[in-house]
Image: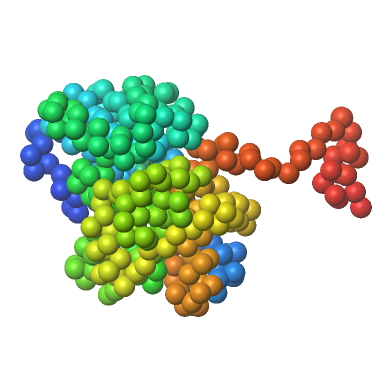
């Protein structure tokens, strides 16, 4: 029995590694990937479908970004870069910071001032990244990151516009197929900058081309209603949503996302913040999976699409839940029911539980 080696080793034959890299390069890995595909009993009962959650919050830094980052930082190191830079709504920055720390190269992150969840900021701080707040939104940060890395050769851009990020992230589709023995009928996921939907579609398409699967899933891309450019068909100038991870008005992988939707006979959908929060609470209370608000978009999309019949009963559906709920404790603690307070008194404890009989 050998321990899970991380994505690059596990899927090396399907990844574009080493073509132009320095001889003797090694993977920069925190043993990301191999996340659970959890059968979601309660969601299955509720929707009449066979629902699974791909729990990406169990990656080393708590989000799917680690899949792309092991590739991006490995490449940066193997091509002699001195530092990595990204724009981020939080998760990418946490991931870049962690991988840069073990690679021993500089990392700076450009984040929209005041608009990233506390846990993510804490991660970037602890992993030792230089945090740079920008007076602007994510789209402004990405433009600045692109300009900086275009000007300074020693700094690698590690956003998902870097093609190796997509390569790493496509492995989630491989894992799902490897676990199910087939592709799901529908794959639902949150969409922000649209790298992940691009990556999943690439993964499914490669398995399809190689005859590993007989059909590819319909892709259901879910955006927050206040930041839904792909649903509306035009960039959104001032995106706003409680799901800060997907507060993005001008997705970099726009064309690839549209291709994934069109080629898969899929759909883009918007979920209001209210629906996102409902799904966020539901998945924690009924499935025991605490995700961040943006991640609940996939579940909100599942609920809406089974209600209006876009997803037929009996379908096999995978919802990617992209990030860990611990990253955003502020949202979790908003609107909590009153917390009981008791003395050292067993009767009071049982009474607080409503179980005195
Ligand atoms: N879910 C979470 C938790 C995310 O952090 C992101 C993106 C997405 C979904 C959307 O994925 O951008 O590939 O469509 N977060 C990026 C970041 C933008 O900076 O961490 P996407």
Q: Position of residue 161 (x, y in %)?
A: 22, 44
Horizontal placement of 100 versus 268: left or right? left
Front residue of this view, candidates 35 and 51: 51
Horizontal placement of 94 versus 277: left or right? left
Label count reads 0
Q: Position of residue 308 (x, y in %)?
A: 51, 74
Res 57 seen here: no
Q: Position of residue 297 (x, y in %)?
A: 47, 55
Horizontal placement of 222 versus 261: left or right? right
Say which residue appears at 14% left-offset and 26% top-offset. Answer: 152
Front residue of this view, candidates 71 and 179: 71
Res 40 seen here: yes
Horizontal placement of 301 versus 346: left or right? left
Way the structure is coloured: rainbow
Is residue 136 depicted above or below 174 in this figure?
above
Front residue of this view, candidates 34 and 172: 172
Q: Position of residue 59 (x, y in %)?
A: 41, 43
Say which residue appears at 24% left-offset and 64% top-offset. Answer: 259
Is residue 297 depicted above or below 339 in this figure?
below
Corner quadrant of residue 269: bottom left
Say which residue appears at 47% left-offset and 62% top-offset. Answer: 301
Corner quadrant of residue 45: bottom right
Is residue 77 depicted above or below 240 in this figure?
above
């Amino acid at each position: 029995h050998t321990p899970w080696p991380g994505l690059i080793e596990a899927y090396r034959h399907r990844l574009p590694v080493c073509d132009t890299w320095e001889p003797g390069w090694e993977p920069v890995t925190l043993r990301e990937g191999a996340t659970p595909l959890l059968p979601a009993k309660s969601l299955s009962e509720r929707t009449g479908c066979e629902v699974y959650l791909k729990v990406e919050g169990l990656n080393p830094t708590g989000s799917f970004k680690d899949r792309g980052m092991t590739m991006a930082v490995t490449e940066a190191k193997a091509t002699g870069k001195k530092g990595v830079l990204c724009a981020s709504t939080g998760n990418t920055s946490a991931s870049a910071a962690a991988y840069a720390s073990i690679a021993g190269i500089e990392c700076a992150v450009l984040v929209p001032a005041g608009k990233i969840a506390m846990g993510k900021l804490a991660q970037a701080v602890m992993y030792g990244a230089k945090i740079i707040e920008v007076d602007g939104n994510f789209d402004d940060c990405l433009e600045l990151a692109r300009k900086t890395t275009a000007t300074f050769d020693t700094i690698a851009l590690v956003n998902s516009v870097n093609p190796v990020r997509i390569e790493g992230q496509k492995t989630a589709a491989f894992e799902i197929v490897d676990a199910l023995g087939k592709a799901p009928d529908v794959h639902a996921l949150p969409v922000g900058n649209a790298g992940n939907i691009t990556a999943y579609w690439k993964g499914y398409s490669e398995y399809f081309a190689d005859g590993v699967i007989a059909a590819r899933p319909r892709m259901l891309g879910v955006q927050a209603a206040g930041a839904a450019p792909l649903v509306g068909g035009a960039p959104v100038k001032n995106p706003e949503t409680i799901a800060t991870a997907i507060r993005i008005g001008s997705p970099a992988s726009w064309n690839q996302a549209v291709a994934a939707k069109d080629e898969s006979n899929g759909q883009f959908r918007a979920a209001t913040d209210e629906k996102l929060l409902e799904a966020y609470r539901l998945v924690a209370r009924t499935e025991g999976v605490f995700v961040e608000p943006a991640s609940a978009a996939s579940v909100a999309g599942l609920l809406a699409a089974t209600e209006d019949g876009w997803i037929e009963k009996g379908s096999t559906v995978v919802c990617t839940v992209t990030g860990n709920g611990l990253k955003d404790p502020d949202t979790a603690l908003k609107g909590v029911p009153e917390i009981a307070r008791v003395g050292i008194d067993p009767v009071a404890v049982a009474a607080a539980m409503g179980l005195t009989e």
